[in-house]
Image (tube, coloured by chain):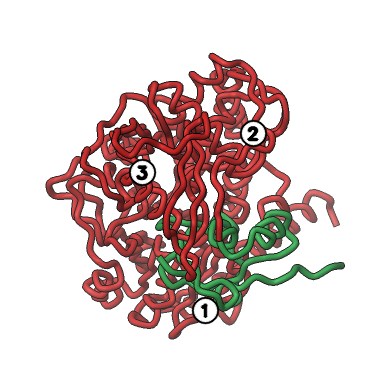
Amino acid sequence: MNKHYFLLLAGIFLFFSLRGVAQQPGDAGVTEIIILHANDMHAKIDNLSKLAYLADSLRKLHPYVFLVAAGDNFTGNPVVDMIPDKGYPMIDLMNRCGFNLSCIGNHEFDMGQELLNKRVAQAKFPFISCNIDAAGAVLKQPRPYVVLNAGKDISLAFLGILELNDQGIPDSHPSNLKGLKFTNGLAKAREFSWLKEKYGILIGLTHLGIEDDVKLADSMPQFDLIIGGHSHTVIEKPMIENGVMILQAGANLKYIGKTTIKVKNGKVVDRAIELIAMNSLKNVNTEIQSLIDKYNQNEEFSKVVGVAEVPMTGYDELGSLMCDAMTNCLKIDFAFQNKGGIRVLSLPKGDITLKNIYQLDPFGNKVVVFNLNPSEIQSLICYAFNIEKNIDLQVSGMTYTVKTNADGSCKEVEMLDPSGKPLDPSRDYSVGISTFVAVTYLFDHRDPGTASPSTSAGCLIDYLKEVKKVNYSGIRRAEILR
Amino acid sequence: MKVNINSREIEIFRGATVQDAVMAFSERSCRLLKKGEILAFDRFGNPTEPDGELTEGQIITLKKTKKT
């Protein structure tokens, strides 16, 4: 056989064998659609070059490949979150990967509504959510759903749904949610069950967490798929609830979900999932990788602001450093840092860079200063302690010991100034706490508090630049006496 | 909010992660979770990343990883 003729035949065979089952005998009228799905990427951009290569490769072989995100694209990487135009690199890279759609997750609000509007406008794909009412807010009203088409005859309706906490708002700083109204996503979704009738295929693109995804499936068997996020669940095997397939691909782009659906007469007749570990992929889109390298090499973040003389580990050491920075920065008597705001649990010995700071304290919380008497300070400490019946607040400017009741709750707090004397019950002290603690912790205070212009991270940078070297080895300022 | 770790109810702040709740459950378990010596699973048997955000009433089970 002529060599060229053989190669031509081999090429034709390969082409048709890779076109997917839609063209295979016995599958007449069946169309195969691939949905690649990520969730909770949290601004982890490094694997987006692999995702781009994977998506491009699949698009060359299959006519219908969609790439979607189930929310929380932001918050978790300072090169994305802590630049003046917050979030820009993430959307830039998602555009280049060819994302078709994202739902809104709670951390989409972290950058504030104005910037979120900017990011939505930058995106070449829509952000959807059915349970946000933005009338009267800065945020532009998101669409509840979008319809993606696979050819002329197949339509996939994607419905976006956002989680709400027990206060009825998504888990973001309340100041970022001004003017927004939220409704229960599970109830609201039922109002859109007509999408199934109209379009034939209904997919939930949710940021609810696995527990609520299961409740959603139980109440709405109309969904063919629920592509979820929020709980960072790694679903490796098909999870079917009430006939609905529930999907989620971990977090931080360690995995990508590849779900293949087969459609006949406008209805899903088969579903298959594959969870792809990104570290198993070797090829990258080199153009996107160059851009990722450029974003990562932001010189600003490599700047050294101080030196750790010894490694710093745990909430006591790191929290004490953060509190000292606040008291020093604002010239206040005491500062408290809640455990949830300490986002890394160790800093190695050596140079501390801006990137380290923003990983430790990524939220951009401002410091609020209250004038509190010792009784009010005790109520703050007790409220925080009772959340977990354990130390929650690290402190600067004083030490304290929580004495507990028989049930482990806070009975009273012994508070000592740096000279070891009890605080003076007749005077007020200036106390700095993050806006998050100020808004969400319930404690007695006559003073409504005043927000300082400083963020806790900004204070930390200034403090390290001033003192240059720090050593918090073995520091423990808060104790429990059970 | 309340979550459940290995059949024990844990009261924890809103927005807490699996790792935060495991820390409240037991510091030792949290250390092992971070080292990858134990894994967290939801009530459906799916593994959950330590930085996964919890919702009210969520049930988490900690299991030792299989030694090879």
How many other residues sit within 10 Å of disc 3, few (<14), some (14-19) or many (≥20)?
many
Residue A17 locus on image (x, y percent): 67, 65
Q: Residue at x 25, y 31 (%)?
A: A450
Mark 2 secondary-structure assignment: helix
From the image, which quarter does the C terminus of chain A lie in? bottom right
Residue that mark 3 sits on: A377
For the residues bearing labels 3 and 1, Cβ distance under 8 angstroms: no
Residue A160 makes an appearance in the image: no
Q: Quadrant of residue A207?
A: bottom left
Chain given the colour red: A
Q: Chain of mark 2?
A: A
Q: Residue type at mark 3?
A: Ile
Labels 3 and 1 share a subunit:
yes
Q: Chain of mark 3?
A: A
Front position in the image: A32 or A127: A127
| Distance between mark 3 and mark 1 Cα atoms | 60 Å
Q: Residue furthest bottom?
A: A242
Q: Earlier in the sequence, mark 3 or mark 1?
A: 1
User: Is the residue A230 above or below the residue B9 in the image?
Assistant: above
Q: Quadrant of residue A409?
A: bottom left
Mark 1 secondary-structure assignment: strand
Residue that mark 2 sits on: A286
Residue that mark 1 sits on: A270
Foreground disc of the pair 3, 2: 3
Residue A56 locus on image (x, y percent): 57, 47
Chain given the colour green: B
